[in-house]
């Protein structure tokens, strides 16, 4: 960020930047705790994760207030305007990450009360993929690194592939034994929430690219989620339509 004649303006931009990073750090920790709650089947970790979502909401409101004040008093232009307006979008995406982390934690409480099912072992891998996306996109934001942001954007397909594999595996277990239906359904919701966190990370990556270059990524975002097109045939595991 370039220095401005009025130092208080620089301070306001810096505070906005730091609030976004603070939100990102909380969301990253919340997501990691949610995955831990699922894999360890620990309702105490889950409860703490759900409670932590309040702090993200508070910071999101602070960011909203900062942006409104700066737009009204500073009348920003060019790169400053992109920076300030984009902060609203990034904060909203980070806040939604926290919501999904809370949803995962809530599901983990139900999962902990049921017998373990094999597809649960695929959750940590998906979680690690998305954790790397969150970390890298926050680094890209802090560094204003458009290329690093684009790499995050491209890696979203890896998360979709992992989700598709878990989706097919889970359907197989549901067909093999009706007792697996309820725990596997909870796992599918968890997996979808993880996949959605990855989507929000790539949304942030797009916004970073816009902040740096003043234009959007013109490529089609790689999406590998084919679960909507999967059909189940009795006697088969799961087949693509």
Image (cartoon, rainbow, N blue to C red):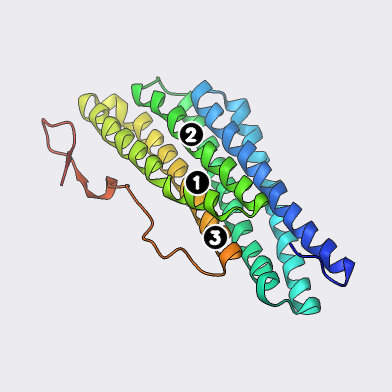
Between circles 3 and 1, the one closer to the viewer is 3
SS category of the residue bearing label 2: helix
**60 left or right of 35 in image:** right
Q: Nearer the viewer, residue 83 or 26?
A: 83
Packing grade of label 1 (10 A; few <14, some 14-19, many >=20) is many
SS category of the residue bearing label 3: helix
Residue occupying the point 54% across, 60% down: 209
Between circles 3 and 2, the one closer to the viewer is 3
Q: Which residue is mark 2?
A: 127
**19 left or right of 141 in image:** right
Q: Nearer the viewer, residue 74 or 121?
A: 74
Q: Which residue is mark 1?
A: 197
Packing grade of label 2 (10 A; few <14, some 14-19, many >=20) is many
**68 left or right of 156 in image:** right
Q: Which residue is mark 3?
A: 209
Which numbered marker is on residue 23?
Answer: none
**173 left or right of 65 in image:** left
């Amino acid at each position: 960020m370039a220095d401005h004649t009025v130092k208080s303006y620089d301070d306001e931009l810096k505070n906005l930047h730091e609030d976004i990073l603070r939100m990102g750090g909380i969301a990253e920790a919340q997501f990691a705790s949610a995955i831990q709650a699922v894999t360890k089947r620990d309702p105490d970790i889950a409860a703490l994760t759900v409670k932590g979502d309040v702090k993200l909401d508070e910071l999101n409101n602070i960011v909203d207030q900062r942006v409104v004040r700066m737009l009204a008093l500073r009348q920003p232009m060019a790169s400053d305007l992109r920076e300030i307006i984009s902060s609203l979008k990034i904060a909203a995406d980070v806040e939604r990450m926290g919501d999904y982390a809370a949803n995962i934690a809530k599901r983990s409480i139900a999962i902990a009360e049921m017998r373990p099912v094999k597809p649960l072992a695929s959750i940590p891998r998906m979680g690690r993929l998305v954790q790397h996306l969150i970390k890298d996109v926050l680094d890209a934001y802090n560094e204003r690194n458009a290329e690093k942001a684009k790499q995050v954007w491209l890696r979203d397909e890896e998360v979709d592939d992992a989700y598709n594999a878990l989706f097919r595996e889970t359907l197989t277990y549901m067909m093999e034994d009706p007792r697996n239906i309820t725990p596997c359904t909870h796992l599918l919701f968890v997996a979808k929430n993880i996949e959605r966190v990855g989507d929000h990370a790539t949304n942030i990556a797009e916004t970073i690219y816009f902040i740096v270059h003043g234009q959007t990524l013109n490529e089609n975002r790689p999406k590998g989620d084919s679960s909507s097109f999967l059909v189940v045939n009795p006697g088969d595991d799961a087949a693509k339509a």
